[in-house]
Image: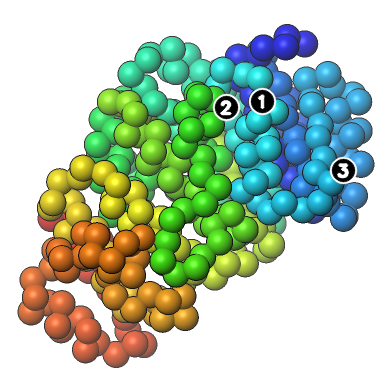
Amino acid sequence: MSTSPQVSVLVPVYNRAYCIEQALASALEQTFGDLEVVVVDNCSTDGSWELIQRAASSDARVRAFRNDSNIGPVRNWLRCVREARGELIKIIWSDDLLHREYLAEAVPLMADATVGFVYSPAMIFFGGDPLNSYTLYESTPLGCRPTAEFIEGSLLKRDYPVSPGCGLFRIKDVRDCLLEQVPNRVGSDFAMHAIAPDALLFLLVAERYPCFYRLKQPLSYFRAAPDGISVTSGRSKLALHYDVAKAWFVSRGDLPPTLVAKFNSMLFIDLLVFRGKPFGLRRIADFYPETGQHSLSVAYLPVSVVNLLAKIPRKIRPRLRLIASRASRA
């Protein structure tokens, strides 16, 4: 095996004995041949490590590593990146699968130096059956698109990817843009709950390039695992912590004032829908890492609408998601 393969497929693992062999097989069965599979076990206790060792002993493309102790999810992702030797990075979460043609379709597109990343729609499947599924990230335009479009769509919660498990990146960008922590004023340890460094990877890489590329077919498969981060964290924690991370991104960029105002509208509505007080979030300014950052633009919605929304009973506030979506497209 080459010591400098074109693609490093990264597989961070913790207690995935029931599915890790499937994940590794989907990486090794790629029709694109110039790859390595870097697996880092985060001190699993369920036999995952033994299965990983068996895979490494049967295929020289698998390079297996194990942490002496559990260092948390994000630090384990970063360990994978440190061990990678490829020019391009493809992440597979250990409970997910990859279509055998993913790399064959995505890698050639990265030859264009103006393209920052490539991604495919993702199928969310249940019960171990990819046929029992629904698809994300397929309602946005196809092909090569301006990254300004991605940044706006991501901030306003349109159908753009959050998980880099559907994306292909350059290793130099992942090393620079996959963050261990996100500055915040609510004492949240992003390295341990792993909510938002994934979405920020897309946003920070998008800043560096004029274009990104969206493939047509869903070539990534995300398992709806009962112990996955998106399930165990709870909907409110997920939504509000992604908001905190995106507010940090907004605070450091030179974004159009109208976009910032629309984003603040989303923050306001999420405060109502998801009840931010348990997380220390009581007003729009609390999402930002420093007092006063971008908080003067209270909302893109008219003041009369803002006042009305604040009076809506809690039990019907989830319907505000539709209002937010329509407002963000104005």
Which residue is at a point 63% across and 39% down the rendered structure image? 78
Instruction: From the viewer's perspective, tell me whether residue 177 is left or right of residue 328.
Output: right
Which residue is at a point 44% across and 69% down the rendered structure image? 186
Residue 236, placed above or below residue 171:
below
* Crowd class of label 2 (few under 14; some 14 to 19; many from 20; radius 10 Å): many
**Upstream in sequence: badge 2 or badge 1:** 1
Which residue is at a point 59% across and 42% down the rendered structure image? 221
Q: Position of residue 229 (x, y in %)?
A: 61, 59
Which residue is at a point 28% across and 52% down the rendered structure image? 251
Q: Pointer 1: what residue?
A: 84
Q: Pointer 2: what residue?
A: 89
* Crowd class of label 3 (few under 14; some 14 to 19; many from 20; radius 10 Å): many
The outermost residue toward the front is 291
| For the residues bearing labels 2 and 1, Cβ distance under 8 angstroms | yes
* Crowd class of label 1 (few under 14; some 14 to 19; many from 20; radius 10 Å): many
Q: Pointer 3: what residue?
A: 49
| For the residues bearing labels 1 and 3, Cβ distance under 8 angstroms | no
